[in-house]
Image (cartoon, rainbow, N blue to C red):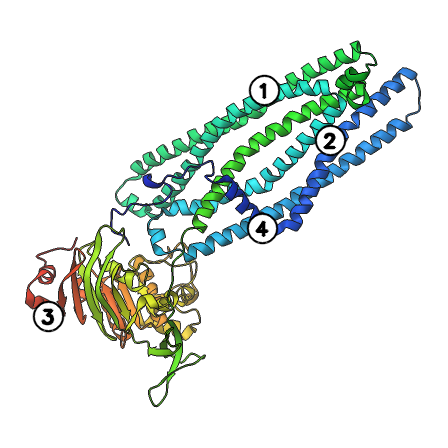
Amino acid sequence: MPPKGTPLKGNNSPGNKMKFGRPQNTGKTVARLLSYVAKSKGLLAIVVLMVIISAGANIAGTAMLSPIVDEIGVLLSSGSQDMSKLIGFLTVLLIVYLCGIAAQYGQSRIMLNISQKTLNLLRKDLFEHLQDLPIKYFDTHNHGELMSRFTNDVDTVREAISQGLIQTISSLISIIGIFLMMLYISPALTCLIIIMLFVMLAVIKFIGKRSSNYFRKQQSAVGQLNGYIEELIEGLKVVKVFCREGKTNNEFAVINEDFRKSATKAHTFASILMPIMGNISYFNFTLTAAVGAYIILTLTEPSGALGFFTGGIKGALTIGSLASFLQYTRQFSNPIAQVSQQMNNILVALAGAERIFEVIDAEHEEDDGYVTLVNAKVDENGNIEEVNERTGVWAWKHPHSADGSVTYTLLKGDVRFHDVTFSYDGKKNVLKNVSLYAKPGQKIAFVGSTGAGKTTITNLINRFYDVQEGKITYDGINIKKIKKDDLRRSLAMVLQDTHLFTGTVEDNIRYGKLDATHEEIVEAANVANAHSFISRLPEGYNTMLTGDGANLSQGQRQLISIARAAVANPPVLILDEATSSIDTRTERLIEKGTDKLMEGRTVFVIAHRLSTVRNSNAIMVLENGEIIEKGDHETLLEQKGKYYKLYTGQFELS
């Protein structure tokens, strides 16, 4: 892990604030998001067709009011009982609306499938890319913020695709269609609507600007809230041990209140838009009705340019035409308000999509290695031959580009550091000219204060990070030439912080070797001295573990973690404070097991308990990134240096 003080580069860090609420590159984000939606382009084409039918049916239905109202007027004025024409109009109106309802229902159902398929692909790409990111990325990014990409950001994208996208398309079609129909009926009244439209747009701009600002703050507060809650849940025991419930409640209250204020203001502005637009619409409706009535009453049978301007294509404005126009007036403001409201949601969703793409675009773990690990066998002459079947013998396959030849080197576990200098941030060196070697069968221990560079050495062996100066060789091969997956397959690591997955005890041990048999798992458990307590569990090896093994003690969880490493049967074993959570009696039992496990293997041990490193072949004492003492236990005691002071209690590790 990077040393304490390494600044986080996550989205909530002071040095790398991302603007929430509005995307930084709208065009690129829209195009990329639509590329996911376009993978359902056949269904999407059907949806667009249904949207056109639905919007068209609504416009056509309103247009049918004109002949219906006019026909009713004719029947009332003439006293005729012949209603066949009226019934015909009503039948057409019913069919039009039924078609619109069916199209709207169909588009909703299909769009639901499209949105879920799109999100499935988006989450899949996001999760798969997370697997390819280097450890450095997770060390320098807030985990709660990363989780927020899968939850809040994905959810905003879902709403935008399933609702916002179609509503926006439908509203735009409705606006264009209604406007053309109003022009057809009466250009004069349409001019009046255009004037009111500018008033509406001014209101939308005024409210929308303030709403989007608060939505931006709301989205930022959500990420902070999630990060704090995740951190608190993970450290709940620490909170209780130090009786800091009150402090955490106060901190949470501040973050939660910040979220409440932002959300309240954002949704207040978003919520008042529709009522204000509705009131403007009512005023517009009343004004249009008054002007339309005036035209009908005062301009009887106008002709020429005046007739066209007041009565449109027909040349005369009728009561039926006015009824249709007034209905269009009511309908015209709704899609405008919906577009403005959806634009806020779409912008927030695009910002969320951009945050998702930010992770997907993060530089994946580079691997320029070309040396691979293969199954091998050794013939009677000592020649190494690659085979397909598992033989228990492994070799490094090393192709040489110079002459096209391939050489094989037996995997033994010979690890050497050659003048290695390393820095996490490129400024402060954590390791300085470190040189060491570990031969197969040797146990190498590292002791030193926190931040001395012990864990960094194990990180470099795994190639979680690459060295800046010097080199590390594995069986004589520079590990930068070895493919990372093959390198890590030859290693097993037991960390101080154990992690168990949801599943049975057997599944968790098998994680070290997915094709391990039950017998191999039991054998590994015996090596780790875990078999005894596993056998006492309610269902033995089939006992289900949940919540990171919450139903087990910390020591039992660590034993399973050690068994997981044992079943992998690696040539190199790394124990990073692996026995820190285990009592001294169990620790002695594990030492006996690991002694058997490390036969013919290279073992690196990091420990604060010096009792665990006494039988090491070599003990490295680190301080400020340098090896200040090295030797076995007896040799170091004779030197009466730092190790002697640590062992005799004259100096304590910090």
Give the residue at mark 2: 59
Using the numbered discs, state the Cα–Cα distance from disc 2 to disc 3 in whole angstroms. Answer: 94 Å
Q: Quadrant of residue 586?
A: bottom left
**Dot placed on the residue nearer the N-terminal end, 3 or 1:** 1
Image position, residue 221 (x, y; %): 41, 36
User: In the picture shown, does residue 351 fall above or below 477?
Assistant: above
Q: Quadrant of residue 279?
A: top right
Using the numbered discs, state the Cα–Cα distance from disc 3 to disc 4 in whole angstroms. Answer: 65 Å
**Dot placed on the residue nearer the N-terminal end, 2 or 4:** 2
Say which residue appears at 17% left-offset and 52% top-offset.
654
User: In the picture shown, does residue 272 fall above or below 356?
Assistant: above
Q: Secondary structure at mark 2?
A: helix
Using the numbered discs, state the Cα–Cα distance from disc 3 to disc 1 in whole angstroms. Answer: 89 Å
Give the residue at mark 1: 199
Q: Residues within 10 Å of mark 3 (few under 14, many from 20)?
A: few
Using the numbered discs, state the Cα–Cα distance from disc 1 to disc 2 in whole angstroms. Answer: 24 Å
**Dot placed on the residue nearer the N-terminal end, 2 or 3:** 2
> What's under tag 4, amino acid-wise?
Lys
Quadrant for the N terminus in the image? bottom left
Give the residue at mark 4: 117
From the viewer's perspective, tell me whether residue 572 is left or right of residue 444. right
Image position, residue 327 (x, y; %): 72, 23
